[in-house]
Image (cartoon, grey):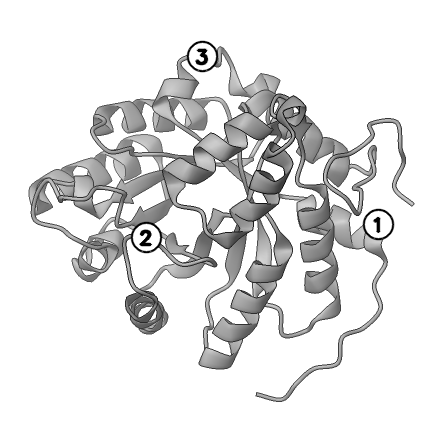
Amino acid sequence: MTAAIATPVDSKQAIIDFMTGFTTETTPGSAAKIPDYRAHLRPGTTVYITFLPGSDFNDTIAVTKRLQAEGFDPVPHFAARSIPNLRFFEDNLKQVTEECGVRRVLVIAGAVKHPVGDFTDSMQLLESGLFDKYGIKTIGLAAHPEGSPDMSDEAIAAALAWKNGFAERTDAACHLVTQFCFEAAPIIAWDKQLNQAGNRLPIDIGIPGVASLKSLLGHAKACGVGASMQVLTKQAKHIHKLLLVQTPDKQVRDLAEYKASDPNCGIRGLHMYPLGGLKRSAQWSYAVADGHIAVSERKGFTPTLKLD
C-alpha cells in the first residue's frame, strides 16, 4: 500500500469532527437507574445494550424496546459464549428484529471462561446465516488494540482476517468496535498494523468516559486492559488523585489529529464507555463536540476554556 503523507490539521475542528456522532452503551442494570435516557442523550444516538455473563437476555430485550420507544438506535449485544443453543439465538434475534425493529447488532465471543452452550466464538454466530435471514443491516465485531487475555495475538489476527472475509459474504455492513484503552499511541500503532495487514473494516475506537481514577482502574483490571493502564497506575501512586475525575482529553486530541491527518487511518468514529455513569460522560462528550470546552493536551480539562 502506498504511504500517504500526513497533512496539517485544524485541531479544534478535528476534535469536534471526531466527537460528533459518538456512540455509547448501557447495561440493563444501569438502565434501571435511568428514568429517561432522553435526559442525557440526544435523539437518534446509537446505544449498545450489553448481554453480560450470567444475565437474562430478556433484560437486554426490555432495554432495547425502551430505547427504541424513547427515540434512540438500540444495538443489542449477542455474546456467543452466553448463548445456550441455536434455537435460543434465533428466537431472541427474531424478537429484537420483529418487535423492536433492530437492524444493528454487536456480535462478540463474550467474557465467559466456560461457554454455557454450543457456541465458543462470534464466528459461529456469524456463520449461522441468521443475521442475514432477519434483515440485520449493520454488524459490529469486537477488536482489541492491546490484545486480549482470552486469545493469543495469532488467534486475534486470524479472527480479524476471517471477519474481513465474512464481510464480503454477508448482506450486512461490518465494522470493528474496540475495547477501551487509555492512550492513543497503542491504538495508532495497532491501526497502522491492521492497515498493512489488509484490514478493510472501519473502526470505532472505544475510549473511557468521565470517571474517577479509582473507578477507571477497577474497570481496567476487570476488562483486561493492556499496557495503556500504566497511564492510570502512575497517577494512582498519588493517593489523593484516586477520587479525582478523569477525562480522556489527550487521548481524544491525539486520535482526532491522527484521524484528520493520515489518509490511511482506519478509524471511523468513537465509542464512549460510560464507566463513571452516563450523565457526566454524555455531558462532557456533547460539550466537546459542540465546541463549548477545550480538550487539553494533558489528562483532564478546564470547563471554562474555549476551543482554540
Count of number-bearing discs: 3
Query: In the rendered view of the protein, which quadrant contains the N terminus?
Result: bottom right
Query: In the rendered view of the protein, which quadrant contains the C terminus?
Result: top right
Q: Amino acid at mark 1?
A: Lys
Q: Which mark is residue 12?
A: 1
**Which residue is tagged 3?**
33
Mark with earlier residue (2, 1):
1
Q: Position of residue 3 (x, y in %)?
A: 66, 85
The image quadrant that residue 85 belongs to is top left
Mark with earlier residue (3, 2):
3
Q: Secondary structure at mark 1?
A: helix
The answer to whether 220 appears left or right of 263 in the picture is left
Q: Tell me how far mark 2 sits from mark 1, CA to CA.
A: 36 Å
Q: Is residue 164 visible?
A: yes
Q: Is residue 73 visible?
A: no
Residue located 66% across and 40% down the image: 248
Residue located 30% across and 51% down the image: 135
Q: Tell me how far mark 1 sits from mark 3, CA to CA.
A: 35 Å
Q: Amino acid at mark 2?
A: Pro
The answer to whether 72 appears left or right of 75 in the picture is right
Q: Tell me how far mark 3 sits from mark 2, CA to CA.
A: 31 Å
The answer to whether 182 appears left or right of 127 in the picture is right
* Of labels 3 and 2, the one closer to you: 2
**Which residue is tagged 2?**
149
Q: Is residue 256 above or below residue 42?
A: below
Label 1 crowd bin: few (<14), some (14–19), many (20+), radius 10 Å: some
